[in-house]
Amino acid sequence: MLKYSKLTEFELCLYLSGIFERIDFVCASYVGSESRQKAYDLCKDIDIKDTPFMALSLELNVPIWTGDKKLRNALTKKGFDNFFRIDS
C-alpha cells in the first residue's frame, strides 16, 4: 500500500490513524440473534457477505449506506427501506 500511495511511511500512518479514529468498531457479540437471523433471511439470496452489515443496521436501527444497486433493489423488494440517502 505504501508503494502505491506515494506517501512516506509517516504520512501514511498519520492518514490511516485519522481514518481509524473516526471508526467505531463493534464486537460481533453485540448483535443479537434476532437481528442476525433477520439479516440472514434478507441477504441469503442476494449477497450473503452483506449479512453482518445488515445485522448491525437492524440491531442499532441505523440506515445502510451502500452504492450496491443490486442489494438496494433486492432489499427494497423484500420490504427493507432503511437506506442512508444523500439526495435531497
Image (spheres, rainbow, N blue to C red):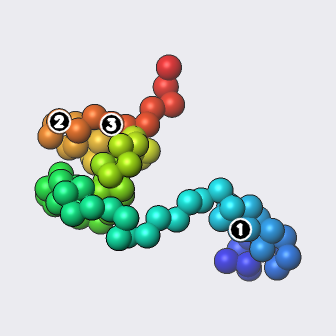
Q: Is residue 30 visible?
A: yes
Check contact, mark 1 vs mark 3: CB within 8 A. Answer: no
Under mark 3, the amino acid is Asn
From this viewpoint, which residue is outermost toward the top?
A: 88
Identify the secondary structure beneath mark 3: loop
Please tell me which residue lies in front, 75 or 67. 75
Please tell me which residue lies in front, 78 or 59. 59
Neighbours of disc 2 within 10 Å: few (<14), some (14-19), many (20+) = few
- 2 over 86 or under it: above or below: below
Gap between marks 2 and 1 measured at Cα: 37 Å
Identify the secondary structure beneath mark 1: helix
Q: Which mark is residue 79?
A: 2
Residue at (56, 60) in percent of width and height: 24
Check contact, mark 3 vs mark 2: CB within 8 A. Answer: no
How far across and how far down the image is residue 28, in percent? 37, 70
| Badge 1 or badge 3: first in the primary sequence | 1
Under mark 1, the amino acid is Leu
Residue at (39, 41) in percent of width and height: 63
Q: In this view, does 48 lie to the left or right of 3?
A: left
Residue at (32, 52) in percent of width and height: 59
Which quadrant of the figure has residue 79? top left
* Disc 3: which residue: 82
- 4 over 47 or under it: above or below: below
Q: Nearer the viewer, mark 1 or mark 3?
A: 3
Neighbours of disc 3 within 10 Å: few (<14), some (14-19), many (20+) = some
* Disc 1: which residue: 16
| Badge 2 or badge 1: first in the primary sequence | 1
Q: In this view, does 40 lie to the left or right of 87?
A: left
